[in-house]
Amino acid sequence: MNNKTDKVFIVDAGAIFFRKIHGQCITVPEVINEVKDDNSKLYFSVVDVKVKEPSKENVELVKKMAKSTGDIHKLSDTDIKLIALAIEELKNGKDVTILTDDYSIQNLSKNIGIKVESVVKRGIVETFRWIKICKGCGRPLNNKTNICPVCGSEAVIRRVRVEKNRRSN
């Protein structure tokens, strides 16, 4: 059974901006670089948040998973690292929740079984996969092409519903 010290929150910048840090928290260096205003810097300096770089192996794993769900088109490098850090903590036996309002982070995290908690916004209600399709003929395309080999039209990204969830967990 997990005790309090086994619960870890992976913190996105929104949790710092809106003063929502609670519990044992970890983030990546890129999130700290996003904190530019003096009030948020001061807040961050007085809360206990560890800063940690995820392994390259876990970053690559997240990229692979994001490609399979199509979220790769919506996630920044910082987003990918936050999810990789959550995977690392899970592998270390921790109970992990990502604190974020970013819907793409929430979508991929839920698709791979990581808990999320919204900071201010309402959390996602449904999870989606993102697929690349031809704008002209509607054929699904692989991620390597932006032009349809059949009709020559450009590709667009569309979402496909995966499941309906209750609020953010």
Image: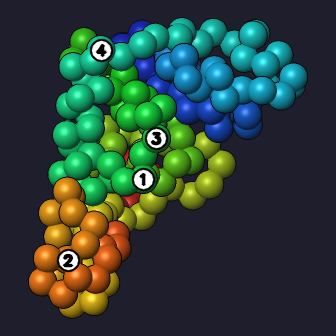
- Taking 167 as reference, is 45 left or right? right
* Residue 67 spot, x, y in % from top left: 23, 49
Compared to residue 167, the image places residue 81 above or below, namely: above
Q: Secondary structure at mark 4?
A: loop
* Mark 2 lies on residue: 148
N-terminal of the pair, mark 2 or mark 1, is 1
Res 87 seen here: no
The amino acid type, in three-letter code, at marker 4 is Ser
N-terminal of the pair, mark 2 or mark 3, is 3
Q: Secondary structure at mark 3?
A: loop
**Residue at left 42%, top 46%?**
75
Of marks 2 and 1, the one in the foreground: 2
* Mark 1 lies on residue: 74
Q: Secondary structure at mark 1?
A: loop
The amino acid type, in three-letter code, at marker 2 is Cys
Q: Which mark is residue 76?
A: 3
The amino acid type, in three-letter code, at marker 3 is Ser
